[in-house]
Amino acid sequence: MASPPSSSLTASAPPPPSPSTITDGAVSGTIPSTEAFAVHYPGYPSSPARAAQTLGGLSAIAKVRGSDPPGARLELRFRPEDPYCHPALGEPRVSTGLVLRLSRPKGGGDAPPRAQVVARVRNAYHFEGMSDFQHVVPVHAAAMRKRKHSECPTNNEDLRTDNEDVMMLVPPLFSIKDKPTKIALLPSSSALSKSMQRAVVQHRWEMDIGPTLALPFNVQAVPGKINWEDHILKNSAEWGWQMAVCKMFDERPVWPRQSLYERLIDDGLQISQSQFKRLLFRAGYYFSTGPFGKFWIRRGYDPRKDPESRMFQRIDFRMPPELRNLPRKERRPEKWAEMCKLEVMPSKSFIFLQLFELKDDFIQAEIRKPSHQSTCSHLTGWFCKPMIKTLRLQLSIRLFSLCPNEDAKNFLRNAHELIERSKKQEALCRSEQLKENKEASDRHNGTEDQAGGNSDSEDVDDDEEDKDSDGYESPPMADDVPDFTLDDPYTSAEGFSNGYLEEMLRSFPLDEDGRNKLGDTPNTAEASDGEFEIYEQPSDDEESSDG
């Protein structure tokens, strides 16, 4: 059987079947094992080569990709030729993307496009910093300024044009934050207190009451008592409620709000939350921050002046992030009294309690010890820093012991080690404070004795002066003139020994006549500027930026 004659025009080989198909705009196929990474470039580069150059080149990209441990950031410099260019940092993130290759046969007409999954994208770099904020030296503006000066016609030969280069003054700190963040500015304490107070005021006579809510801790005077008895009808329900709140403040001058409310409910008083706010507003006040922050304080009582108020200070507890997502049984919200017993794990990640109400023997024994602090600080109140740390650790130990988790056991073990160290620091701090108080008392007593001795000698001198007086009125003595004392820069030399000062003076160069070369020049501003280097004091901004 003869074979058919072959045609002169051989048909082109059909394209290989695509491993992926496109159906209704969706690509389906086999995911290859090849992996790649993606870069979300925050701009429009002129070419892929320029994009790689701004990322530091292929060698820098390979170095970041092969870093150990992984997770290094990718630096992007929009002007790699400028050494002062502020880099944008790309954070690596896990990705589930794919790299697709789409093609259409040439001259295929209406042939469907072909799709192929090239690789899977495991990681992608995202640039979320402020890439559009750059410090650029205004070289173009300077060149234009020079051109204008050179073209300006003038016959004055003394007029000189500045032809120097532009100074490269780069700011030492570009920005505190690299990523844009939302900043919620807090209103001033006085404005916040007034706005909150307007929401509580109900009667006209309450409008005359001064600031009471969210007072700053450094306020000079605390609110005094008011005569609410003159404005509330006696034997009414409101009268009984207000009397009950005042009796609670007589029992204890500082109360947590929830504790006081539960105490009134347990006593059989049915008070709504809105009515309870007005009762507290008439009987107490509270600070916005500090060791008594958010605790209601009896009007007229200032805990900053009473060391015995240390037992009413607040103490906070923060749940570690590892323990915040533990499964908990569904239960009703804890009461304040139950939380103070330290028998249940708190349901919130942050709580603050009152030291006086905690059911712990160690804490109760420590807060009743006499305080050796002379002032009440905003940070630790009437306690020293090691004591506050010890109390926090003791609270953490009680709460961590309620959780059977392995992470909680590690935190518990660490807390036991830290509390022993903190106790030693507290004992050392207490002994140093006692020593300082004793030295201050001795200096005070010595000053009084010296003042008494001086007064006796002054009496004798006064008698002698009276005998020698010729009857004329004497000029004013030095005691009548205001006492002007020198500042520290002038009195600081008293601490140096005479030998050190003599040795320093001998080190100055002398001429043949034995005179000081540096001291023989006339005392003029020009001479001083030419001989001595003047160092400026660092500004507050520079010190803060270094810190």
Image (spheres, rainbow, N blue to C red):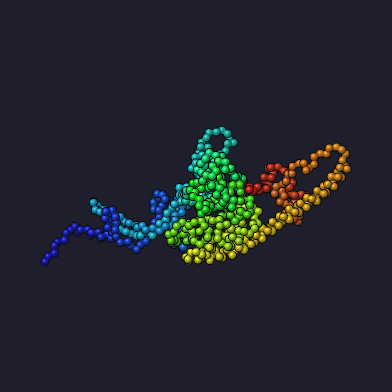
Q: Residue furthest left?
A: 1
For residue 26, what is the image quadrant?
A: bottom left
Q: Residue furthest front?
A: 235
Q: Is residue 366 visible?
A: yes
Residue 42 image position (x, y, % from top left): 42, 50
Residue 50 image position (x, y, % from top left): 41, 52
Residue 537 image position (x, y, % from top left): 63, 48
Q: Is residue 27 left or right of residue 498?
A: left
At horizontal 56% and vertical 39% (from top left) the residue drawn is 208
Residue 402 image position (x, y, % from top left): 50, 64
At horizontal 58% and vertical 58% (from top left) the residue drawn is 388
Comparing 546 with 103, the one in front is: 546
Q: Is residue 59 visible?
A: no
Q: Count the marks: how many?
A: 0
Comparing 463 with 364, the one in front is: 364
Picture layout, residue 343 above or below residue 162 = below
Comparing 341 with 67, the one in front is: 341
Q: Quadrant of the N terminus?
A: bottom left
At horizontal 62% and vertical 63% (from top left) the residue drawn is 424
At horizontal 63% and vertical 54% (from top left) the residue drawn is 307
Q: Is residue 153 left or right of residue 21?
A: right
